[in-house]
Image (cartoon, rainbow, N blue to C red):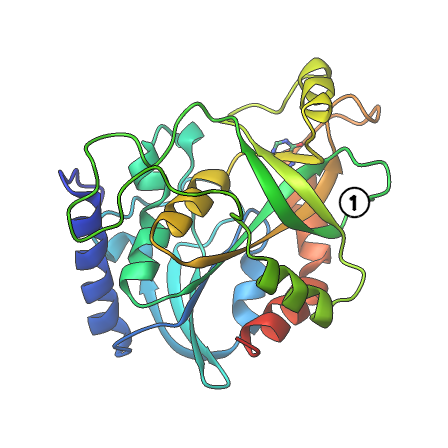
Amino acid sequence: MDQPASDPYELASSAASELARRSGLDRHDAVVVLGSGWAAAADELGELVADTPLGDLPGFPTPTVAGHLNLARSVTIGAVRVLVLGGRSHLYEGHPASTVVHGVRTAIAAGCRTVVLTNAAGGFNPQWTVGQPVLIGDQLNLTGTSPMLGPPPPPHKPPRFVDLTEVYSRRLRDLARAVDPGLPEGVYAGLVGGAYETPAEIRMLRAMGADMVGMSTVLEAIAARHLGADVLGIALVTNPAAGLTDEPLDHTDVLNAAREATPRMVALLRGVLEKL
Ligand code: HPA
């Protein structure tokens, strides 16, 4: 149901009510947004409670990108009620920022205080190889937009001008390293995407202090921080960024690399979620 709303927070709250009705869970504790190629992880994350097609929830467009799953899946991991969002909306699909962050806002309206954002990324830190999961330590929002654009948030929501000093929770990064010691950390550059980068753009991003690049995550992280949730970001390096090898960049390779890393990702996500 892709419907415009004058108040995106109201739309998120109606999606959360419908999710509660459909799943039978009056609230969820944490949300995991699965990035490209992470869909296989959805089957192993916890005990299934309910599956709700994303298109049945107000404000969610049907995902159009291969490697995504059209489901809001409610699972339990021990006592923790986890919402797994198998689909994600991207700017490059033509969606506005408010649609891109609608899943995160809905999850927070449904009670989630922890937001786990996963993605596939091109890496340009020479120490990392394909299949390496990386904790996002900080981000560059280079999309040219923000979920904080538009009319001011309604009075019952925090004001804009969100403090982004610690977008990605240090506590959650420490927890992730306790589960999977040796996980490296890096800066994720989020671009509008739609095409991969040029080698010159990768050199620019490197000079700007980024370690990896992708087409998602940064807006969702800002929206989650605005609403006070703690964010954990995990990027999976699925390919060397443009210009670093002679191989052409291909979405199928990205999906394959992600699939091979699924067991490690599942162990990491479960390990973090059950300790929340
Ligand atoms: N660039 C941008 N997004 C990506 C990449 C990349 O190299 N790999 C996976 N997502």
Identify the residue position indicated by label 1 in the image.
130
Residue at x 66%, y 17% (from the top left corner): 201
Placement of 189 over or under 227, stated as above or below = above
Does the beta carbon of the residue at mark 1 sit less than 8 Å from ligand 1? no
The location of residue 88, given as percent across then percent down, is 43, 47
Query: Residue 139 lies in what quarter of the image?
Result: top right
The location of residue 178, given as percent across then percent down, is 72, 71
Query: In this orientation, which residue lies closer to the viewer: 155 or 96?
Result: 155
- Which residue ends up furthest to the top in the rendered image? 200
Q: Is residue 261 left or right of residue 139?
A: right
- Residue 205 appears in the figure: yes
Give the class, few, some or many, for how many residues have Cα within 10 Å of label 1's Cα (few <14, many ≥20). Answer: some
The location of residue 235, given as percent across then percent down, is 64, 48
Query: In this orientation, which residue lies closer to the viewer: 211 or 100?
Result: 211
Placement of 225 over or under 40, stated as above or below = above
Residue at x 63%, y 48% (from the top left corner): 136
- Residue 53 appears in the figure: no
- The kind of secondary structure element at disc 1 is loop
Residue at x 19%, y 65% (from the top left corner): 17
The location of residue 270, given as percent across then percent down, is 59, 73
Q: Is residue 155 left or right of residue 60?
A: left
How many marks overall?
Answer: 1
- Which residue ends up furthest to the bottom in the rendered image? 78
> Type of residue at label 1?
Val
Residue at x 71%, y 14% (from the top left corner): 200
Q: Is residue 64 left or right of residue 267?
A: left
Query: Residue 199 lies in what quarter of the image?
Result: top right
Image quarter for ligand 1 equals top right
Query: In this orientation, which residue lies closer to the viewer: 79 or 276?
Result: 276
Query: In this orientation, which residue lies closer to the viewer: 12 or 239?
Result: 12
Placement of 243 over or under 131, stated as above or below = above
